[in-house]
Image (cartoon, rainbow, N blue to C red):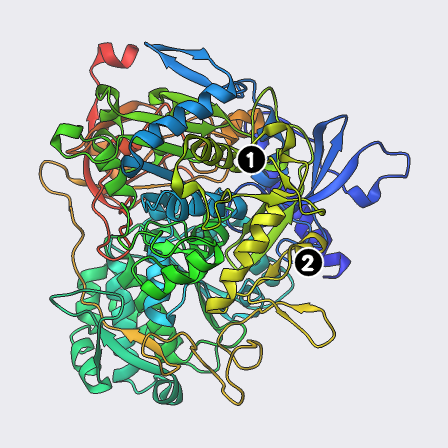
Amino acid sequence: MDNTRRAFMKQAAMAAATAAAARSGSAFALPVVDPTDNDASSTIHWNKAPCRFCGTGCHVQVGVEEGRVVAVAGDKHADVNKGLLCVKGYHVGGILYGKDRLTKPLLRDGDSYKEIAWDEAIDIVAKRIMKSPNTFAFYGSGQWTIPEGYAAQKFMKGGLSNNHIDPNARLCMASAVTGFLATYGVDEPAGCYADLDECDVLITWGNNPAEMHPVLFSRVIDRRSQGEKVRLIDIGTRRTRTTDAANDFLLMKPHGDVAIALGIMHLLIENGTYDKKFVENFVNFRAPEPENPTLQGEAISFDEYKKRIAKYTPEHVSELSGLSVEQIRMLGELFGDPKLKITSLWCMGMNQHTMGTAINSLVHGVHFLSGHFGKPGDSPTSLTGQPSACGTVREVGTLSHALPGGRVVAKEEHRAQAEEIWNMPSGRINATAGHHTVKMFDQFTKPTDEGGDIDTLFVQVTNPGQTLPNLNLLFNDKANLKDKFLIVSDVYPTATTQLADLILPAAMWVEKNGMVGNSERRTQQWFKMVDPPGEARDDCWQTIAIAHRLFELGHEGMKDKDGKFIFAVYDDDGEEVPVWQWKHYYDVNVDKALFEEYRKFTVMKHKNLAPYEEYVKARGLRWPVVQQADGSWRETMFRFAGFDDPFVAEGKEIDFYHSVTGDGRGQVWFHDYQPPPEVPDDEYPLWLCTGRVLEHWHSGSMTRRVSQLNRAMPTAYIEVHPEDASALNIRQGEVVTVESRRGTCDLPVWINGRGQPPKGSIFVPFFDETKLINNVTLEAHDPFSKQPDYKKCAVRIRKQDAEVAKK
């Protein structure tokens, strides 16, 4: 990257960050500096770490002085961001220093809490589990580091023989997972961020990377500033900041993306512009079995596929999607042009969808059928919202049906492989999948005498009391169930800790060692740089400490087949280190020990990882990472393509070596359009879509503690179309009630704001714990991925009476 381009990107990022903060007259939380500019006399010590926020995986340089993070800088040596950060990234150091950090274990005592010692807290959890191991559940997230998630996975499935473990990524990435599996036979994207540097056309399918992944989006905007032509097509249900940069904005109806993808494929076939070589050599055609829908489906011929797709004419797709016939034909012509390089990007709009697996599979199919695959710039790419939704949830497999390395609990061979690596007796791993997220919380909030089979729930690094859909059904009812016990490990008080029976103070980010994996298969590592406050401790330590207390209580599952503790860690002399005791946890590198064990799983499905020390030296490596003849380790940028992927059979151009059909071919799926589960009617006449904002990350529990970010965006709001506002006699800034069949939420109105929904639609961000829009949302979910649809449900807006409004 030359100096001119680097300077431009840095200036653009700084301008964006400054503008976001300046709206409230605030300054930066930490100085933005270049660590290479400091002189030798500086007392600031710098080290690398990936940003704590989204799945982009930007690297930062963290400056520490006298035991505190005092500065953050974009890392020039990181390929992901090349020194650039978004406004949240520039403030990431500030998340450690909110005034209300949790610092001691707290046990509920009536309507309040009392401080207790860690030994007592660990004992309480262990004895709850010991009493009834099968009614215990573990809920984590894509914020778990790889070692944290791996420890939780081994503890539950290998130790307790209990598969009731699931992550919040079930709410955000599960449909991407099932889409990849159904298409490639293996999870994770084939391309990488370099596609953004090469594509001629970028299509955003129902997402807003200008705000949600701004560093990635800047790669495209930067190319334009250098005189390159990149056509940006924004397909969405509302205008956003991404729309502002788009050449074409295609306003679709909710659920319209399914019809659009089907319509493109229809045109490719009708016009004869599909890639005949790609179809003949690299794909099969499949459709769901009507009576038994699975990710394998049933084989159909190309002729049968053409018959089924024939009804999705531009005219029919226009009716279903809301796009014009001309816009649909334009998309068909673009994908039919072999001279173009086309990259598709998507995130929650396609994933949080009751047809999430279908639309993910269909967009892959568009790229396959058109041949826009397997070359730099030609790629279907899913983005993630959490720092390790890929590396921990998807690769480690912390889902209720999965095992590390792409294994699943339902297959005897896969269970045996895990038991061998874990040195556990045959049959230790349960063959029945556990509860997915929606089912887990449904069972936890259901009275035991009515069949609620989860009575103890441990939540780490996530905030389900704010982020679950239909909170009144799936979370709030816990308040009335005295026999249900909620354990929450977190950094700050949240909507979830309000109903907790036991609160455990957690270390965060560079207060501990860590490893994560980003959206482009890049595994990244960092070391602990500062101590956590008070008695806050690592989540990984918490899991190991609970496991060892169970070991002491005689739980057989905490022993391997040699009778040793399942998390035994040894020093260089072969002596076991008591890592379950906090004072000894950092006597050795527990992360390294867990990671090196986990690495053994990764070779089973060509997700090969390098040794831990290689990640210490690098700014991340994209898997599969394979060792070369000279002993070096080589990452892979483009999977399944013979020019780059080391596992493609020699002489093959494209090889889907984990094909579900066993023939090296990918799958082009047919899914019929299905309507949304709930649509507006006379009683609830408006569509509701929820999402995020630039300044805050997810539920805001970290970013709202950074005063500059919080002042820049202090409250959630409701975006309303001017005509809807006029019809309801609603004014700018007025607080109104959004109401569905499930619950209500009070919000101020923003007309013609940052985003602009069409008439008949509203948009609400979910970052504000004082305005829980998920009291309103719907828990209906995709039948394959079990991922809920937060993007479309029916609501109405109700003006508050004068007395309520005054309060």
Q: Position of residue 217 (x, y in %)?
A: 53, 55
Q: Residue at x 54, y 49 (%)?
A: 214
Of 360 and 227, which appears nearest the observer? 360
Residue 493 seen in the current view: no
Q: Position of residue 381 (x, y in %)?
A: 45, 63
Disc 2 and disc 1: Cα gap in Å?
37 Å
Report the number of numbered marks. Answer: 2
Q: Quadrant of residue 449?
A: top left
Q: Position of residue 507 (x, y in %)?
A: 56, 30
Label 2 packing within 10 angstroms: few (<14), some (14-19), many (20+):
some
Q: Residue at x 77, y 42 (%)?
A: 34
Q: Residue at x 49, y 61 (%)?
A: 601
Q: Is residue 789 above or below residue 655?
A: above
Q: Amino acid at mark 2?
A: Glu
Of 386 and 797, which appears nearest the observer? 386
Is the N terminus in the top left, top right, bottom left or bottom right quadrant?
A: bottom right
Q: Is residue 545 above or below residue 761?
A: above
> Label 1 belongs to which residue?
20
Q: Amino acid at mark 1?
A: Ala
Residue 806 seen in the current view: yes
Q: Is residue 337 above or below residue 401?
A: below
> Label 2 belongs to which residue?
614
Of pointers 2 and 1, the one earlier in the residue sequence? 1
Label 1 packing within 10 angstroms: few (<14), some (14-19), many (20+):
many
Comparing labels 2 and 1, the label whose residue is closer to the camera: 2
Secondary structure, mark 1, is helix
Please identify the residue farthest to the front as the structure is shown. 562
